[in-house]
Structures are given as structure tokens and as C-alpha cells.
Amino acid sequence: QELQTLLTFNKVVDDQPESSGINAEYMGSNKMGTEPNTAALDQYARGWGRGDTSIIYPSLDTSFTFIMTGMEEPVKLDKFQQFFVQFRKDVEAGGGPGVESDVFMKFTNVIRRQVGATLVEAAKFEVPGFATGCYLAAACGGKVLWEEAAPDS
């Protein structure tokens, strides 16, 4: 039960504190709550939650890649802005939040695990009115290295 408390929590995106909804027991019992990799993953999720690349970009490593099931190729850092703009348009056209909305994505069942120097995160995501699914993301050196997402079919 203690392990469950340490590794699983729900992210609160709107008006979320820097801790991303990590409860005080978690923060007080483990250094992951204040380390750079945690901060990077928190900022990355905050950016996706608001649909704002200006929040996402500072958390990304220069080697960052994003891939989603069904994509032909991973999106590298230099193409991420272009991808994200088109993704927001596609989401709006598909019944999800409008391009100008700052409520874009929600996260639940977040699990983080330290693997060597890398912090790996797995969670469920929801783009209201558009899609749900799950993802894995990893941060090392205070930057997000990659994300792999899989929408539910």
C-alpha cells in the first residue's frame, strides 16, 4: 500500500501547484518530488494540459522525440511545433477543445518510476470530446527525452 501511495497519483492540471497534485505524504517521503526530472515531467504535462507549447518547450531535451500509435515517424524536436499546431486543429475538427482553449488534456493514474538516472512516467490521458489513451514519457538531466502515446481504439 505504501508503494502504491508513493508511485500513483492523479495530476491536477488547472491551477495546479508545482507538485502536480502529488500529495504531501509523497513529497515528504521521497526526493522525487523536488528533483529536476520531476519538475520537467510536471512542466511537460502542464503544457499538454493547457495545450501550450510555450510551456512544453523549455522542458524538452534537444534529442526529444514524440511518437503516437499510427504515426509513420517519430516527431523530433525541430518539427514538434508544426506537429502540435496541426494536432490542435485536428482535435478541434474532431470535436475536442478549440485551438484557443487552454483546457486541452487531462491525466489520471500517473505512475512514476526511477530507472537509473531516468524518471519514467506512465499515465492515462483524455482530450475531452476527442480521445483517450495512455502514454509513457521519460526525463533525464532535468529534460524530457521522449514520449510514446497510444490512443484507445
Image (cartoon, helix red, strand yellow):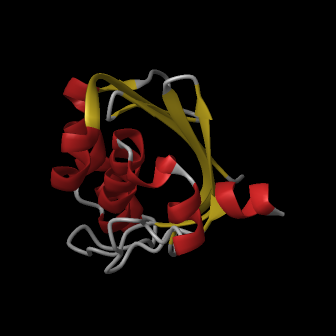
Identity of the residue furthest to the front in this view: 29
Residue shown at the point (78%, 61%) measured from the top left: 2
Question: Visible in this render: residue 71?
Answer: no
Task: Judge whether 131 appears above or below 97 on screen.
Answer: above
Q: Residue at x 15, y 52 (%)?
A: 54
Residue at the right extreme?
1
Q: Is residue 139 above or below residue 89?
A: above
Q: Position of residue 141 (x, y in %)?
A: 34, 27
Depth check: 62 or 92 in front? 62
Q: Is residue 46 visible?
A: yes
Which of the 4 quarters of the picture holds residue 131? Answer: bottom right
Q: Residue at x 21, y 54 (%)?
A: 55
x and y percentages locating residue 116 in the rendered image:
57, 22
- Residue 65: x and y in percent read 39, 26
Residue occupying the point 38% across, 52% down? 34
Residue 108, given in percent of the width and then of the height, sits at: 61, 66
Q: Going by the picture, which residue comes out furthest to the bottom?
A: 15
Q: Quadrant of the N terminus?
A: bottom right
In front: 12, or 91? Answer: 12
